[in-house]
Amino acid sequence: MADLIAAERELLNELSDFIDMEETNLRNLKRVLEFFAVSDRLPEDPETHKWFREKYVRFPQQEDLDGAALGIIRVQEIYGLYPEDLTGGSLTGIPSPLGPDEAFHIAQEAYQHRRFQLAFLWASESLTQVEKGVEADVMETTLLEYLASSSWHFGDFNEAVFFHQQLLQHDPMNVTVREQLSQCETKLLSEPSAFITSLEKSSDPYMALCRGEGIKMTPQRQGALFCRYSTGGGNPRLMCAPVKEEDEWDNPPIKRYRDIISEREMEILSAWLHDHEDPVVASVNQRIADITGLYLKNAETFQVANYGLGGQYEPHLDALVRFPVPGSFDEKAGNRIATVLIYLSDVQYGGATVFPVAGVAVQPQKGSAVFWYNLLRNGQRDNNTRHAGCPVLIGSKWIANKWIRERGQEFRRCCSLYESE
């Protein structure tokens, strides 16, 4: 990890002049489409390839390019974006057009993952550029085949008939296309046709919350949420320096602690160190214990994650479902009673932590931490804490998770008098 950090710093120093002259490109590198374009271009530059190979930095592979394309697809699905929204600069004001071959690659990935509507839209974008005379490796007939097949699978038989007819104009003797056209015409007469060119935003609670929709905030609930300076219940270390505590939600109780970690501490945490490997990590652990009032000896080490462009985490519960193996850490330490989520970076667009059941969206804020209990006082999992990480559209999201185990909390978070709590 130290070698990687050193290589990164050396690279930044050597390219500082270039970055100054290409400020626009630097901004664009934060965007989904520019990441895709860079991944596609770098393997063709032998000098850059040689430099990275000498520095032992892994060069982008085909799987990286495919992953970037899938990231674009995820972003489109959740935020309801058309190709022109991403390429025309409507989000950032900076256009970043993709060529026909790049658009076709995204169409291929979408088709392979049965996202036929997005496959159609990207193939259409590619075809539009080809028809304008933009140089491309992809053949026009190949694009027509994707458009015809995507519209058929999606159920837009009007478009399917049209593009099969276009294919026949290129190859009038193609028996297979004629048979497919006949099937499309039969479907068109017997079944209602969908509209593949019109994107409909998903009503899925997770996706809606990522778009800022469906947040279950009411005036009554808003009036019950407060911010305060907290001493962690009278902790001596916090009496002279209380922390900024803010209620994000009431059920489940979700609290945010602002400005609880410094820039230097965030840099060290990003290296994913074990608790005993650096005194700074131990200091952050002690701060978490002071703020939450919980016992951290059985807590897991920090889990650091980076979500790049299009990166996300599907809805899940942090509390474990499986029965622990006898003698294992899970049996000795117990379940994950609580989660502390530290944001190590800001995100320009996207990247919220959402709770679909509770109907809450928590936005990333660098240097802050969000805290919630995963278990009810009776030890059962709290389904209201099911949460997810929304896709990053612009920027990069760094987080550090601390999962606190239930052993040692018996007198710190006592059982309730009510069995259901």
Image (tube, rainbow, N blue to C red):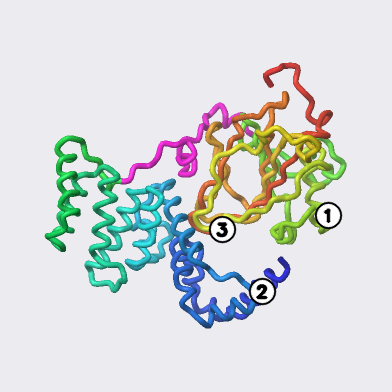
The numbered mark, 3 or 1, whose residue comes first in the sequence reads 1
Image side of residue 280 versus residue 14, left or right = right
Q: Amino acid at mark 3?
A: Ser
Say if 168 sits above or below 298 in the image: below
Task: Look at mark 1 in the image and give the residue it sits on.
Answer: 276
Q: Quadrant of the C terminus?
A: top right
Which of the 4 quarters of the picture holds residue 339?
top right
Farthest residue to the top: give it.
Answer: 418
The percent coordinates of residue 94 (x first, y second) are: 41, 65
Q: Quadrant of the N terminus?
A: bottom right
The percent coordinates of residue 373 (x first, y second) are: 69, 34
Image side of residue 230 versus residue 343, left or right = right
Q: Residues within 10 Å of mark 3 (few under 14, many from 20)?
A: many
Residue span colored magenta: 199-225
Image side of residue 243 versus residue 94, left or right = right
Q: Amino acid at mark 2?
A: Ala
Residue 295 seen in this snapshot: yes
The numbered mark, 2 or 3, whose residue comes first in the sequence reads 2
What residue appears at the point 68 percent right and 51 percent down from the top-left corner?
Answer: 400
Say if 247 sits above or below 86 in the image: above
What residue appears at the point 59 percent right and 35 percent down from the top-left corner?
Answer: 386
Task: Look at mark 2 in the image and give the residue it sits on.
Answer: 7
Q: CA distance from mark 2 to mark 3?
A: 20 Å
Q: Could you tell me which secondary element the residue under label 3 belongs to?
A: loop
Q: Is residue 209 magenta?
A: yes
